Amino acid sequence: MSRDMEDAAVRRPPTMTDVAQRAGVSHQTVSRVLSKHPHVREETREVVLRAIEELGYRRNSAARALVTRRTQTLGVVACHPALFGPASTLLGIEEAAREEGYTVSTVNLRRYTRTELADAIDHLQDRGVEGIVVIVPQRQAVSALKELKVQLPVVTVEGGHDLDLPSVSVDQQLGARLATGHLLAAGYGTVWHVAGPPDWLEAEARSAGWRATLEEAGVQVPAPLVGDWTPLSGYRVGQELAGRVAAAAAGRRSAGRTAVFVANDQMALGLLRAVREAGLSVPDDLAVVGFDDIPEAEFFLPPLTTVRQNFTAVGQASIRLLLGQLDGQAARPDERVVIAPSLIIRSSSVPATH
Amino acid sequence: MSRDMEDAAVRRPPTMTDVAQRAGVSHQTVSRVLSKHPHVREETREVVLRAIEELGYRRNSAARALVTRRTQTLGVVACHPALFGPASTLLGIEEAAREEGYTVSTVNLRRYTRTELADAIDHLQDRGVEGIVVIVPQRQAVSALKELKVQLPVVTVEGGHDLDLPSVSVDQQLGARLATGHLLAAGYGTVWHVAGPPDWLEAEARSAGWRATLEEAGVQVPAPLVGDWTPLSGYRVGQELAGRVAAAAAGRRSAGRTAVFVANDQMALGLLRAVREAGLSVPDDLAVVGFDDIPEAEFFLPPLTTVRQNFTAVGQASIRLLLGQLDGQAARPDERVVIAPSLIIRSSSVPATH
DNA sequence: CACTTGATTGTTAGCGTTCACATACAGGTG
DNA sequence: CACCTGTATGTGAACGCTAACAATCAAGTG
């Protein structure tokens, strides 16, 4: 009985003191070896390392965190992590963090309500993360975050730059300008626009970039159509658009073919299907440009011209900013990183007759 | 100077003792309130809660973990987390874990070498996770894991059931049978197969299910074509297949149209494009069935018949198994969970002439 | 009324680290 | 040779919490 209990006690993981005992040194020397302190004799170092090896010892992270006040953990709040963009960003963040010796704890939200966001941040703070990256693509979430007044260092991603927090985002306006400009340059008279949901900052910025480009070119700005990022919404909008294009084609012959800039690739996919079903040809009757460059885009029918975002860079930048806040005690709410997207030209925007 | 230092010291987060002092009780009473111990007078409970509120106190998770020996954290090792399947599984895991009061730390691998896997698991163990979910879709990774002999509870996902570890996976064979059977039933004489990379267990199982179904039906089994999951590889294979189908069509008229079961939706997309470009029609000249039901599949041209996997269920099951191991001390390596997939029929496999 | 019982609170001792400090010894310096 | 300097080690005290054990008091019980 007493023996059993002893055995059970022995089975618990070895501590630094156990290692010290085995190596014939003090626990502090073991600690020094582990933290690569310079003043340790090579011989003792080896003895300690051998003891560590033999016992299968690993430092207790909780004890370490307790005394150092550092958990070496960062939190991430994400939404829609099964979509290509968010998932890629998440990957970039995790890799960059691990590179710097940090672990990442993620909380995924189904919807972006104030409560859910608050709960997520609470959860992470309770777990002792040292800082948080919040992916806040929606206006609603941004204002919720503004009211929350988190005690920890926070970096926002895709949340615009209105907040008094360091932020990283892709230059969505630029992306929209590249797309729209490309279509105008290719000789299309009009560029329609299928926008994302109104409260998404990315949707807004892409709309704004599209509109500005048209205005600057002195072209009339058609009323934007609105989708919700899903292929289905793109399909529905596409049906409507196909109708208008067909009517226009019947009305004025050769008045300059029309084009459409769709706010993401998934909606563009749905739109392509609708256009096909309407018996129209892409790009001859309607040129299409998307946004995101999901892996599938190259194999759409036809292959989709689109705007590529460097999600890895976004992830890396957000970690850089967060760690910057952790090191330099002072928060620098003015730090903004803007990543430039690039246009990938494929056949959905290049008429064969060209 | 000394005042500054005092201020800095004061600024550090309040402890349980601070709360106790303010509430006029012992720190232990505060602890009892927090852990919902029954024997606390309602009045004191309120006083304590108010003090907590006023000081903005939160429990120090490191101190808690140190004494309870529980970090309330689980680790996940994933690969290709930007792909739909893995990302969805990850999401399911995180949600299920959070539901149970656990936090999830993720490590993403670029490639599945033994070293990378070992490093990832090491990293997680160093961080004190209580258990690990490993998504091991490749044979190579499974054998690496076998040799690793991790001390912690481990659950494998999509790693087959050969390991002496609890495991969760989707019944890939069944999925392949549903797909192949559906095509045979629809009257297609032959079902080709585009397989995934050979060392992927999912690819193997899907091949096996396809082969078995054909054999059971007494149909000749064509040599499988092989891709690497990417749309590009599907495109290349599709070009080859289109050539054969065209040749066959020229040779024997109406000898029963052919069909192909592609091991994932992305390759199916590439294949669809190749078939189109070859001037053939899907499903009239060639019926296509995919696997995964990615959100885009419904909007392919034509909409893709495919096999849907319930990734959320996979995530939940893996957490259930892992927590089961944590509670019931004894590891139960015999626990297997198999999730049944379902066939989603769309027009890529239903000829219009039908 | 002494005696058990249960509710409510407090006291003390770790958990396994790191940090600050003390100690011991070697080699140079005046 | 006393004295400083730097290297190499050990000692003791936190870190902030929970668990185990006391202690106190009110309410029943025989």
Image (spheres, coloured by chain):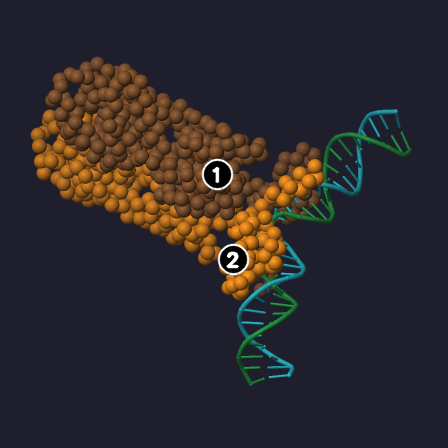
Chain colours: A brown, B orange, C cyan, D green
Which residue shows up at 24% across the image and 35% down it? A233
User: In which quarter of the view is residue B234 placed?
Assistant: top left
Circles 1 and 2: CB atoms closer than 8 Å: no
Between A41 and B71, the residue placed more toward the observer is: B71
Q: Which mark is residue B35?
A: 2
Which residue shows up at 59% across the image and 57% down it? B23
User: Which three-letter amino acid code belongs to the residue tagged 2?
Assistant: Ser
Identify the residue position indicated by label 1 in the image.
A132
Numbered disc 1: what chain? Answer: A
Q: Could you tell me which quadrant the N terminus of chain A lies in?
A: bottom right
Residue A39: x, y in percent?
70, 34
Numbered disc 2: what chain? Answer: B
Residue A299: x, y in percent?
26, 27
Marks 1 and 2 on same chain: no
Location of residue A30 with respect to A256 vertically, above or below: below
Between A129 and A28, the residue placed more toward the observer is: A129
Between A337 and B90, the residue placed more toward the observer is: A337
Which residue shows up at 24% across the image and 31% down it? A225
Which residue shows up at 17% across the image and 37% down it? B347
Residue B194: x, y in percent?
25, 33
Residue B353: x, y in percent?
9, 36
Q: Residue furthest top?
A: A354
Dot 2, how many residues are within 10 Å of its Cα: few (below 14), some (14-19), or many (20+)? few
User: Which three-letter amino acid code belongs to the residue tagged 1?
Assistant: Ile
